[in-house]
Image (cartoon, rainbow, N blue to C red):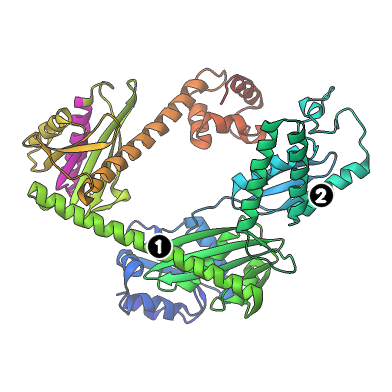
Amino acid sequence: MFNEELKLVPNKPGSYQMYNENNIIIYVGKAKDLKKRLSSYFRRQNTGKTAKMVSEIVYFKYIVTETELESFILELNLIKEYNPKYNILLKDDKSYPYIELIKKPYPKLRVVRYLKVKKYKDRLLFGPYVNAYAARRMVNLINRLYPLKKCQGLSKEVCLFYHINECLGYCNYDIKETKIKQMENDIISFLKGNDLIIKNKLLEKLNYYSKEMNYELALELKNELNYIEIILEKQKVELYNKENLDVINYYYYKGFLGIEILFIRGGKLIGSFNDVLYAQNNYLEELESYIALFYNKKEIPKQILVPQELNIKLLKEVLKTNIIVPIKGNKRKILNMAYENAKINVINNYQKKENLLFRSKGANKELSDLLGINIIRIDAFDNSNLFGSFAVSGMVVFIDGTPMPKEYRKYKITIDKNDDFNAMKEIIYRRYQKALIEKNILADLILVDGGVNQIRAAKEVIEELHLNIKICGLVKNKDHKTNELIDGDKLEAYKIDKTSNLFHYLTRIQDEVHRYTINYHKQLRSKGSISSILDNVPGIGPKRKSVLINVFGSVKNIKEADDKNLEKYLPFKTVNVLKEYLNNFDI
């Protein structure tokens, strides 16, 4: 395979791209020696994900570079550009939340997210916090304990926060710099790891409210104190020099790569991020790419601890930070902790997938035996509408007990929106008439979400198309839970043990098709509401409305967009009219 093409590949560093029959890049890699790396794909036996990828390759291309570093950077850029399906990709591309202390003109605390962390003279950032809820709760607590500025702008009169002693009245009074400085120092000390400051402050207020017999507020503060103690109890890792660093380790198991990243701030473990992904045979190189992409939109700490198998020099060049392989001491213990977490996570995930696959395959065979047919492919259908509006259908596909999302299909209903019988007929006809024309694989079993009425609708169409496909209905009880399977030929319900794998399998199919259809219905409903609102804005016609819907996706996004962004698509005057109009909506 590709023998002639491989003869022409040079023994030089570079990045290579694998293409499928649709001229789409399905994988991007890098190599010190392009010839050796590309030959390894086609001249030896591959397994797992690699074998699946190689089976789809129709041709490959490559770009020669001067150094391995250049090939690595090129690989990262191509992955970000094309998002190839066989590359390891991030689950979470969001930036992490930070707690920001604004010093000037008035002290203020808030939770922020920055794609790129910048340093400001009068602002201090603490974090990142993996748990956004914990960060917000911490800020709310500090705001209650210290009289920071809480409102927006400057008011002519002091607000409620001043009267309840949670603000110093910055709008109307000159506050002594020493008082503000002491407050800031306390907050900074706590956010850097001095827990006693806040705990003592909490106890002080808690005792005060108890003496005043304000037991409700005292209970609230006691709950906050308990929360802080729980959070601090979880932070078992202590580094003596109060360092800020990330710790990265991995575990590879039967084609799965588990990645664990621990965040150490002020010498304490404040959170973690983990991922489990299908990996190629060259998983270490993929891990290096993953790490570089991970920090593309996140703060890069001054130190990152990694295992020695990784290309340390390469990571240092790309991330421009200190990459360390600890050999002993506390840092080695933390790296080992990350390894153990990655191992546990990947083995647990693998076992879950294996158990689910085992149960699903067994249940699929059990269903075949029950119905007396050999079932490989199941097509399941569901309809959805809201008071006759935005009627849609969805189809999900299970093959050998496994869901196949690429085979899922969405349908808009064209007939009378309240006619479930004919809606089912329309959708079954559209699915299988197209399958006959295009000679696509047909289902062995059709499952419809509903009883006898839906079964009859599907059977009418299947018989008109002269197809021989078994049809059954999945019926829910009054609590909207899967209840029974109805045979489409006998129109009788099968007795299935509700604790069996088969019953759980049917429930899973019904839940999946319902979820898929409802999500599509929500999308249409959302776009419909955008469309109806925009119809009433002067200066926005069909073309501009279409552009706004495609670009922003929701009324909320349009309302929150800044004027400059909107002015890319609308005239200045129309932007003002639109913003004024949307302000009337509570979105």
Provide the residue designation for mark 1.
348
* Cβ–Cβ under 8 Å for marks 1 and 2: no
Tell me if residue 9 comes above or below residue 545 in the rendering: below
Q: Which percent across, then down, holds residue 412? A: 31, 31
**What's the residue at 77%, 34% (across, down)?**
211
The location of residue 162, given as percent across then percent down, is 81, 29
Q: Residues within 10 Å of mark 1 (few under 14, many from 20)?
A: few
Q: Amino acid at mark 1?
A: Asn
Quarter occupied by the C terminus: top right
Q: Secondary structure at mark 2?
A: helix
| Sequence-earlier tag: 1 or 2 | 2
Q: Amino acid at mark 2?
A: Asp
Q: Which mark is residue 48?
A: none
* Residue 75 seen in this snapshot: no
What's the magenta region? 421-449
Q: Is the residue 10 above or below the residue 541 in the image?
A: below
The Cα atoms of the two marked residues, 1 and 2, are separated by 43 Å
446 magenta-colored = yes
Q: Residue at x 56, y 33 (%)?
A: 557
Q: Nearer the viewer, residue 211 or 326?
A: 211
Task: Check the image and report above or below for 178 versus 399.
Answer: above
